[in-house]
């Protein structure tokens, strides 16, 4: 990945309905979203010149804003069109897409009912979230200190910026100990997810994954569930306790950034990336390609 800081890159960003120079896409230091996390965002990937499941991501962005109490001031059609045009203007075929909506700087304080809702989209080239050479060997995860909160205490069905504070803390702590990421439990002590990806386990040919009742039911997660079912692989969504991890043979993460990434270790538990993980890595890689490109 380029070492150029993100505020110093070239290209354009779509900002409140206009394409502006990348370096000019700025906000004030007293922006409400910066101080009070009144922001929602998406992570998307383009493959072969098309954003995978763009509409699903856009609809979730709008719904996340609604959950946080604000209306994104653009329609899904407008956001999709802006994303597609920006991808072309950036000149990328394979890229990462980051739309974000946030409360502006008109009022400063916990309450900011009259603040403008700003929307921006940035697109840049971002390779695999984890080292491709290590991917099929399986990455190593630590066990996070912080837990996913009770949905009665946080808007867990939204992709809200504030929910990622404990993810950043947990990933930094894991990386400081030599791990690639961390597995988070929920407030009940059940297995939840990694810091930015959902988790799956394999036992006797069956996929097991935590029920997403206090974290996002990821778009990639749902895609992989569908892919597994197409292969005739049974998928069980249920509560999973940490003490069960020793009984699973394979483990992998799913997410827009992570795609499908096998796991070899979670704290003291060990896994061996096997046939099901490899099958779903390959199936997902094929699924995300535009159908026209895949047919050529």
Image (cartoon, rainbow, N blue to C red):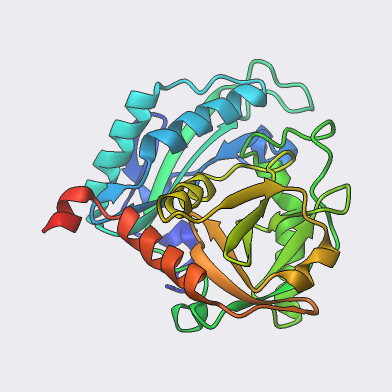
Kindly give the residue lying farthest to the top in the view shown.
114
Q: Residue 217: x percent and y percent?
A: 60, 42
Locate residue 153 relative to residue 248 in the image: left or right. right
Observer-nearest of 91 and 150:
150
Image point 71% across, 59% down: which residue? 168
Classify residue 81 by image quadrant: top left
Observer-nearest of 93 and 156:
156
Classify residue 117 by image quadrant: top right
In the rendered view, tell whether residue 142 sits above or below residue 34. below
Classify residue 171 by image quadrant: bottom right
Residue 173 visible in the snapshot: no
Q: Residue 25: x percent and y percent?
A: 44, 44
In the rendered view, tell whether residue 113 sits above or below residue 117. above
Image point 69% across, 55% down: which residue? 193
Kindly give the residue lying farthest to the right in the view shown.
188
In the rendered view, tell whether residue 106 sits above or below residue 220. above
Observer-nearest of 127 and 72:
127
Image point 61% across, 21% down: which residue? 70
Q: Quarter holding the C terminus?
A: bottom left
Observer-nearest of 206 and 124:
206
Locate residue 104 relative to residue 62 in the image: left or right. right
Image point 50% across, 69% down: which residue? 277
Q: Residue 243: x percent and y percent?
A: 85, 66
* Total numbered labels placed on residues in the image: 0
Residue 145 visible in the snapshot: yes
Q: Residue 170: x percent and y percent?
A: 76, 63
Q: Quarter holding the N terminus?
A: bottom left
Locate residue 251 relative to residue 89 in the image: left or right. right
């Amino acid at each position: 990945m380029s070492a150029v800081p993100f505020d110093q890159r070239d290209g354009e960003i779509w900002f409140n309905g206009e394409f502006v120079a990348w370096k000019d896409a700025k906000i004030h230091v007293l922006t409400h979203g910066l101080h009070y996390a009144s922001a929602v965002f998406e992570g998307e990937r383009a493959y072969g010149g098309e954003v995978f499941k763009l509409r699903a991501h856009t609809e979730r962005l709008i719904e996340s804003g609604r959950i946080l109490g604000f209306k994104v001031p653009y329609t899904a059609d407008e956001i999709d069109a802006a994303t597609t045009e920006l991808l072309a203007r950036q000149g990328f075929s394979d890229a990462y897409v980051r739309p974000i909506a946030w409360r502006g700087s008109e009022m400063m304080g916990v309450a900011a009912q009259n603040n403008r809702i700003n929307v921006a989209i940035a697109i840049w080239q971002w390779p695999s979230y984890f080292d491709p050479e290590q991917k099929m060997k399986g990455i190593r995860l630590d066990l996070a200190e912080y837990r996913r909160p009770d949905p009665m205490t946080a808007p867990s069905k939204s992709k809200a910026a504030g929910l990622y504070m404990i993810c950043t803390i947990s990933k930094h702590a894991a990386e400081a100990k030599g791990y690639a990421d961390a597995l988070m439990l929920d407030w009940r002590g059940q297995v939840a997810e990694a810091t930015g990806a959902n988790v799956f386990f394999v036992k006797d040919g069956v996929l097991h994954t935590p029920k997403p009742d206090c974290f996002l039911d990821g778009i990639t997660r749902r895609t992989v569930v569908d892919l597994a079912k197409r292969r005739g692989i049974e998928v069980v969504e249920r509560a999973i306790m940490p003490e069960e991890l020793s009984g699973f043979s394979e483990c992998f993460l799913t997410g827009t950034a992570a795609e499908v990434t096998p796991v070899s270790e979670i704290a003291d538990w060990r896994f061996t990336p096997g046939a099901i993980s490899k099958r779903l890595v390959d199936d997902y890689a094929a699924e995300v390609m535009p159908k026209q490109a895949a047919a050529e």
